[in-house]
Image (tube, grey):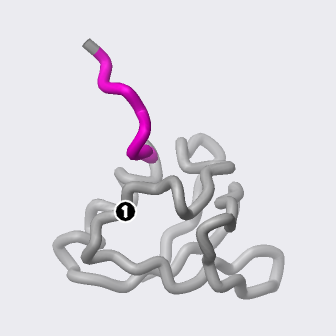
Amino acid sequence: MEFVLQKDDACNDAKVKDLSLPDTINMVSIKRGGQIIIPRGDTELKEGDVITVYGRLKDIEGIRDFLNTCPLPDEPEEE
């Protein structure tokens, strides 16, 4: 399934290695400016990227919300 990273998505400029993607989701490719990028840990997500993910349908359905909030593993929880 493909998702386009929007201007206001919190995952803009985030590195793939810093994302807390569920284990059941694999980021397969990123289309950017006519090129296809195989995502690696240091790959940064940019506005307009077309992100292809593969995984269980019930998990993929939440990816749009994930890109909007972009939870990172090291973020301290608010009290």
Q: Kindly identify the amino acid type of the residue bearing the numbered disc 1.
A: Leu
Q: On the rendered image, what quadrant is the C terminus found in?
A: top left
Tell me if residue 37 comes above or below residue 65 in the rendering: below
Where is residue 68 shown, x and y percent of the image? 45, 46
Asked whether the viewer can see residue 60, the reply is yes
Where is residue 27 shown, x and y percent of the image? 47, 78
Q: Is residue 7 left or right of residue 71?
A: right
Where is residue 38 shown, x and y percent of the image? 64, 85
Magenta region: which residues?
Answer: 70-78
Where is residue 50 shown, x and y percent of the image? 61, 73
Q: Give the number of callouts.
A: 1
In reply to whether residue 29 is colored magenta, the answer given is no
In reply to whether residue 71 is colored magenta, the answer given is yes
The residue pinned by badge 1 equals 21
Q: Residue at x 51, y 54 (%)?
A: 18
Asked whether the viewer can see residue 71, the reply is no
Tell me if residue 25 comes above or below residue 75 in the rendering: below
